[in-house]
Image: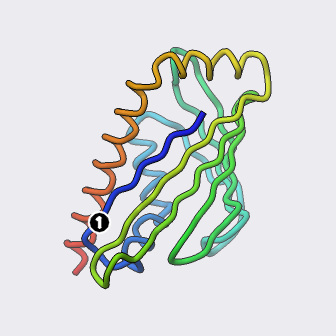
C-alpha cells in the first residue's frame, strides 16, 4: 500500500532541507503527539545509519517501530526504512528546487506486510484508503505550512 503527497514551500531548498532534517525537533513533535521516541545510534552528525525506536498507539494497539535512515543526500533526499511487528515500510523524502525561493517537498510512504497479522492490518487500512489519503494529504499540507512559517521566521 502506498501513500504519496507533494507540497510547494516558499523557501530555498537548503533552508527546507535543514528544517526537514532537524531530527531533534521531529523527535520533540512526536513526543508531543504521545509517541515515545528514542534515538538508538551514536552518530554525531545526520547521516546514513541514524536510527530510532518509537512506540505509539495505532488502531487501538500499542505499536513499536524501529527506524533506520538508509539514504541521506543533502539537500535533495532522505529515505527511512522501518519495521513494526511484521510490517516493513519505506518513506522517501525528496526536495526539488522550483526556483531560488520555492521548493517542492515530496513524501512517499510504502507499507509492505511480511506476516499474516500485518496483512490483516494493511487490509483494514485499504478499506479506509480514501479517508487515510485525505488525512495524509492534510497532514502534509499542515507540515509544509509549518515549514514555510519556520523558514520565514528564520530569515
- Location of residue 111 in the rendering, given as x and y in whole percent from the top left corner: 64, 36
- Location of residue 26 in the rendering, given as x and y in whole percent from the top left corner: 45, 54
What count of labels does the image hold?
A: 1
Who's the residue at 67% across and 15% down the image?
120
- 48 above or below 32? below
Badge 1 density bin: few <14, some 14–19, many ≥20, Cα 10 Å:
many
Who's the residue at 52% across and 59% down the image?
93
Judging depth in this view, the residue of 96 and 145 nearest the camera is 96
Answer with the quarter of the image where residue 36 lies. Answer: top right
Quadrant the N terminus occupies = top right
Farthest bottom residue in view: 100
* Left or right, residue 36 beside residue 152: right
- Location of residue 13 in the rendering, given as x and y in whole percent from the top left corner: 39, 77
Q: How is the image coloured?
A: rainbow
**Which residue position holds label 1?**
9
Who's the residue at 31% across and 81% down the image?
99
Amino acid at each position: 500500500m502506498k501513500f504519496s503527497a507533494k507540497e510547494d514551500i516558499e523557501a530555498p531548498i537548503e533552508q527546507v532541507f535543514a528544517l526537514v532534517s532537524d531530527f531533534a525537533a521531529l523527535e520533540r513533535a512526536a513526543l508531543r503527539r504521545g509517541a515515545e521516541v528514542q534515538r538508538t545510534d551514536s552518530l554525531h552528525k545526520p547521516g546514513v545509519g541514524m536510527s530510532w525506536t518509537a512506540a505509539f498507539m495505532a488502531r487501538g494497539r500499542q505499536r513499536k517501530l524501529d527506524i533506520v535512515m538508509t539514504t541521506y543526500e543533502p539537500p535533495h533526499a532522505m529515505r527511512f526504512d522501518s519495521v513494526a511487528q511484521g510490517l516493513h515500510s519505506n518513506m522517501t523524502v525528496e526536495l526539488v528546487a522550483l526556483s531560488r525561493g520555492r521548493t517542492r517537498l515530496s513524501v512517499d510512504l510504502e507499507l509492505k506486510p511480511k506476516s499474516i497479522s500485518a496483512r490483516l492490518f494493511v487490509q483494514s487500512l485499504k478499506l479506509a484508503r480514501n479517508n487515510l489519503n485525505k488525512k495524509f494529504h492534510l497532514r502534509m499540507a499542515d507540515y509544509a505550512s509549518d515549514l514555510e512559517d519556520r523558514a520565514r521566521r528564520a530569515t
